[in-house]
Amino acid sequence: MIYEFEGRTEKEAIDHAAEELGLEKDDFDVEILETQRQGLFKKGHVRIRVHTEKPVSPSYTGGSANAGNYHDEENIQRTVPRQPVFGDPAARNEFEQKMIAFVTELIERMGYAGKVSVLFREEFKLGLKIDSEYSSILIGKKGKNLDALQLLANIYAGRQGHPDVRIILDTENYRIRREESLVRLAYTVADRVRESRSSILLEPMNPFDRRLIHTTLVDIADVETKSEGEGLYKQVRVYYRGVR
């Protein structure tokens, strides 16, 4: 089995994993996924992946505990879900039927026709695909319309008794294209920061996009990132490590 945990330091994350899983440290292997050192205005952050064949504590529920008081909207630990299941776009159960019907009615009330189907399934995630000739409008500038639709879908899913399932909406493979674009942007900005030994503040982004920037640049030795601002759409500052 595979699990993910977080902490301010590597030791804290490993100690937390051992305590939550009810295992000795020799009972599991540790893979370091993300490391951000502590700075003057920034807490340290380490994310690890734990691999074990040992049975874990019956009290472990997965994804509900945080190391100490540390938590962040961009870094929510949980048991690593199974790989996505593709291939069956039709609803398999009542919950999926309701989600498809809700999103379909939502875009129709906006005045646009479209067909909604299942894109993928994971243990704690359901992807829905919107096929519409109005996809560009449904996506909106920088994906903000699609994000708004996705937010409403997640609220509805919670009201249907599934607050632990994250709904992902996509159309015209926007999510994949956006991810590729952000990765390229992250490396380009990192190069500029390293050359100028200064910092660059990126445009406001949603939590998923910000997390992608953070994780893309985490292994670059002399560059760090931090989120700035308030609310859902914060900005990521990419800066040379010697600049605060």
Image (cartoon, rainbow, N blue to C red):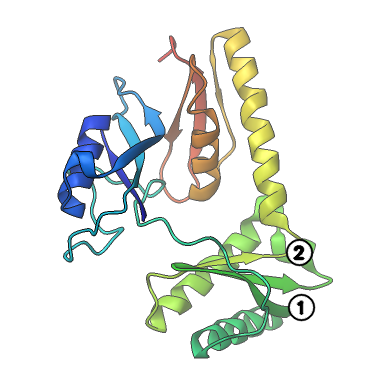
Answer yes or no: is residue 8 visible.
Answer: yes
Percent from the top left, x then y, of residue 215?
50, 36
State the separation of the CA atoms marked 1 and 2.
9 Å
In the displayed structure image, the side of residue 102 where residue 62 appears, left or right:
left
Q: Nearer the viewer, residue 61 or 214?
A: 61
Q: Mark 1 points at which residue?
A: 112
21 or 185, nearer to the observer: 21
- The answer to the question of whether label 1 and label 2 lie on touching residues, with beta carbons closer than 8 A, is yes
Q: Position of residue 152 (x, y in %)?
A: 52, 72
Q: Residue 29: percent from the left, percent from the top?
A: 32, 40
Q: What amino acid does circle 1 point to? A: Tyr
Residue tagged 2: 137
- Establish if 185 lies above or below 54: above
The secondary structure type at the circle numbered 1 is loop
Question: Residue 172, image x and y in percent?
Answer: 77, 62
Confirm whether residue 9 shows in the render.
no
Asked which quadrant contains residue 162, the reply is bottom left
The residue depicted at 45 percent of the width and 68 percent of the height is 123
Identify residue type, mark 2. Answer: Ile
Q: Residue at x 61, y 85 (%)?
A: 91
Return the residue nearer the eye: 14 or 8: 14
SS of the residue at dot 2?
helix
Q: Residue at x 35, y 56 (%)?
A: 78
- Lower sequence index among marks 1 and 2: 1
Task: Left or right? Give the position of 65 relative to 230.
Answer: left
Quarter the N terminus occupies:
bottom left
Quarter of the image for the C terminus: give it: top left
Q: In which quarter of the image is residue 102?
A: bottom right
At label 2, counting other C-alpha atoms closer than 10 Å, the crowd grade (few under 14, some 14-19, many 20 or more) is few
Which image quadrant for residue 7?
Answer: top left
- Residue 72, numbered circle: none
Residue at position x 64%, y 26% from top? 187
